[in-house]
Image: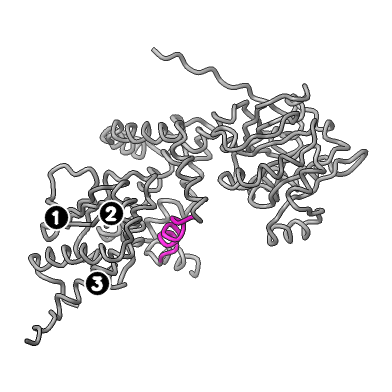
Amino acid sequence: MNLPVPHPRLFRDRDADPSLLRGKTIATLGYGLLGQPLSLNLRDAVGSGANPASVIVGSDDEPSSARARADGFEVLSLVEAAARADVALMLLPDEVQPEFMPAIGARLRPGSALVFASGYALAYGLVTPPAGVDVLLFAPRMGGEAIRKRTVEGLGYMSYLGVERDATGKAREIVLALAAAGGSLEFGALEMTAKQEVVLDLFVEQAFGPWMGAALLSAFHVGTEAGLPPLGLLMELYLSGEMSETFAQMARDGFLPSTLSHGFAASFGGMTRALTIDREQMAEQMRSILGEIDSGAFADALQDEYKNGYPCRPFLDKVVGDDDIISRTERDFRAM
Amino acid sequence: MASPAPADFTAILARMIALIDTKLSPVQREKLGTAMPSIQWEFPDVDTKLCLAASKDALRVAEPVDHPPFVVRMARSTLEDAAFGRRSLGAAFLAGRIHVRGMNPLRLREFIMLVDPLLESYREAHLESASPPSAPVS
């Protein structure tokens, strides 16, 4: 019998001293989905007062640079920002990092810290950070907009953090300080390796997400075929917000207890139908996906996609961008 | 545009594969053949199955099999709607009108390479069948 894997350590604000970042230069390399909220959070936390940290942005992308300048940041090229950094946050897209890492790594100073917001490039050996540099993981588990909103509201957000290489002897203190100043530890951060982080992230995206999406699409199309109103179906499925409230309730009250809170008819109907779902088929597919993520086969395919100029992207964009009945129904609702 | 009768439909599909063959380069054929050496297309509404076999040298029609490793199933009208621009394959896929079984999702790129030539070739083959070429002048 497999023994349960022990829970990773959970860090909270009490475990961190964000003042360790004061007087340091923190460079966020990339100003996209994560770069903007983290830069703003870090500046708010340690960028003012006595001995403030200097939060600068590294970006080679003009629209991102313009956004960062509009937010009041000093913007340098990626390599110039890396050269100035005591702490550099690598926030470029996963598949892009291997191309930029050699130039960035060459400019990092010994004793500085290189922090990855995703374990992808490290876990699959796609980058080689330079010697003498701490290599850290601080991976928020929240979309960028929500990171900023939850931080401003004092809620914090879940993240993973870890030390992949402790060159200075202070790596853990630095990543904890960064997670606290970045706004995460109000909620909490779990200790993870880069490989654990990326496998968890990709597995849930690829094994759970598609089943949820496919279930939603199938319910919508079966219902409309049977003559149910499309808008009513979308309301039941997600437009009313009931479903997102249900997920929030799962997080608050527990997964199984939350199933009892919708009345007996809902739990009787839901549980009895769940018994008839072919879970073994589902599990078999999930095992296969997990195997391809763990072995690096998915990473190979993603890197191949990047190197060849994203040939699948137009097809996928077209599927999402089509004028389908769901999008039309949503538009009708918003116009009401 | 009227749909062809099932017998004609099979002939149009066969012609479609011949036309796709002319649109793919040897490198593309080889990539397709390596990633998915056979793709069984099934149109249950007209009880039609057709297997596309790919190799470096050519695409060809092969005999359908009972347990194909890779199947794409849809109604004939779904293919025709996409080929003639009435409804995209993406919308049909989202609507659950296309069922794909056995594809390695990490080789999606090779399958995508086939999509536009396939729709274009079906359209050409369909139009050819509607207006057969005139008899050669002797």
Q: Which residue is mark 1?
A: B49
Sooner in the amino-acid sequence: mark 1 or mark 3:
1
**Callouts 2 and 1 in the same chain:** no
Measured along the vertical axis of the image, is residue B138 above or below residue A307?
Answer: below
Q: Which residue is mark 2?
A: A222
Structural crowding at the residue carrying mark 1, measured as other residues with C-alpha within 10 Å and reported as few (<14), some (14–19) or many (≥20)? some
Residue A257 appears at what percent x and percent y? 46, 30
Q: Nearer the viewer, residue A179 or A155?
A: A179
Q: Nearer the viewer, residue A38 or A82?
A: A82
In the figure, residue A147 lies in which quadrant? top right
Amino acid tagged 1: Lys
**In percent of the image, x 19 and y 63: which residue is there?**
B76
Q: Residue furthest bottom?
A: B137
Would you say residue A3 is visible in this rendering? yes
Q: Which residue is mark 3?
A: B123
Check the residue under mark 2 and report the chain it is in: A
CA–CA distance between discs 2 and 1?
A: 26 Å
Q: Residue furthest right?
A: A50
**Residues drawn in magenta:** A310-322
In the displayed structure, does residue A209 sit left or right of residue A182?
left
Q: Is mark 1 in CB contact (under 8 Å) with mark 3?
A: no
In the displayed structure, does residue A9 sit left or right of residue B71?
right
* A317 within the magenta span: yes
Q: Nearer the viewer, residue A198 or B97?
A: A198
Number of the front mark, 2 or 1? 1
Q: Which mark is residue B133?
A: none
**In percent of the image, x 28 and y 64: which residue is there?**
B118
Measured along the vertical axis of the image, is residue B117 above or below residue B54?
Answer: below
